[in-house]
Image: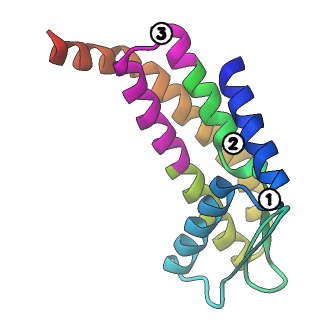
Amino acid sequence: MIVFTIVYESYLWFTEQQRELDWITYKVSELSHALAVALGVANCEFSCFMDGCYIGVEGKMINVLEGCNGLKLALVYSSYIIGVSGWKWQSVVQVIVGVIVIQFFNVFRIGMLVVLRDIGGDLYFFFIKYVFNVLIYIAILFLWLIKPYIDRALYQDVN
């Protein structure tokens, strides 16, 4: 985890020195905007600055910051997989699949938050505080629980 954290912090430091928003936060925001538009949010706007991206309808924008990009959760997941299995090609495959699943869920989460914010009401606050947090941790737990089955499938291919 320490190695991943150092790499991630270096990445953030480098993008800050360039006076740019980090690429991953930008891409997560861009894909979330596309999802919100596909889900029917009319007049959905998308703009990014060095401190984050804004997505939504004027007056109901949500701010996607670096901490919202899902990478910290992906680092925790990756650290667990590498810590348990070591640096094997099977572990790398699991890390890649896990990071993709986590990022997919994160884009879905932010896109749905834009939709909920557009609809209005307290549902947005309930989902942002409770539902999506529980769901992402359940997804990561599920990925950890299926690890032995993935290991067996990948190791059968080797033998």
For residue 125, the mark is 1
Which residues are the magenta region? 80-103
Q: Main secondary structure of the magenta part?
A: helix
Name the residue carrying label 2: 133
Residue at coordinates 78% horizontally, 68% vertically from top-left? 62
Q: Position of residue 73 (x, y in %)?
A: 65, 35
Instruction: Indicate the quadrant containing the N terminus: top left, top right, bottom left or bottom right.
Output: top right
Q: Nearer the viewer, residue 98 or 82?
A: 82
Residue 47 versus residue 111 in the image, above or below: below
Categorize mark 3 by other alpha carbons within 10 Å: few (<14), some (14-19), many (20+): few
Give the CA distance from mark 1 to mark 3. 40 Å
Residue at coordinates 46% horizontally, 29% vertically from top-left? 95
Residue 42: quarter of image: bottom right
| Circle 1: residue type | Phe
Residue 41 versus residue 154 in the image, above or below: below
Do tag 2 and tag 3 residues touch (Cβ < 8 Å)?
no
Q: Nearer the viewer, residue 23 or 29?
A: 23
Residue at coordinates 67% horizontally, 47% vertically from top-left? 131
Q: Nearer the viewer, mark 1 or mark 2?
A: 2
Give the CA distance from mark 2 to mark 3. 28 Å
Q: Who comes first in sequence, dot 1 or dot 3? A: 3
Residue 139 versus residue 117 in the image, above or below: above
| Circle 2: residue type | Asn
Categorize mark 2 by other alpha carbons within 10 Å: few (<14), some (14-19), many (20+): few
Give the CA distance from mark 1 to mark 2. 12 Å
What secondary structure is marked by label 1? helix
Q: Position of residue 11 (x, y in %)?
A: 72, 42
Q: Is residue 129 visible?
A: no
Question: Was residue 101 drawn as part of the magenta stretch in this picture?
Answer: yes
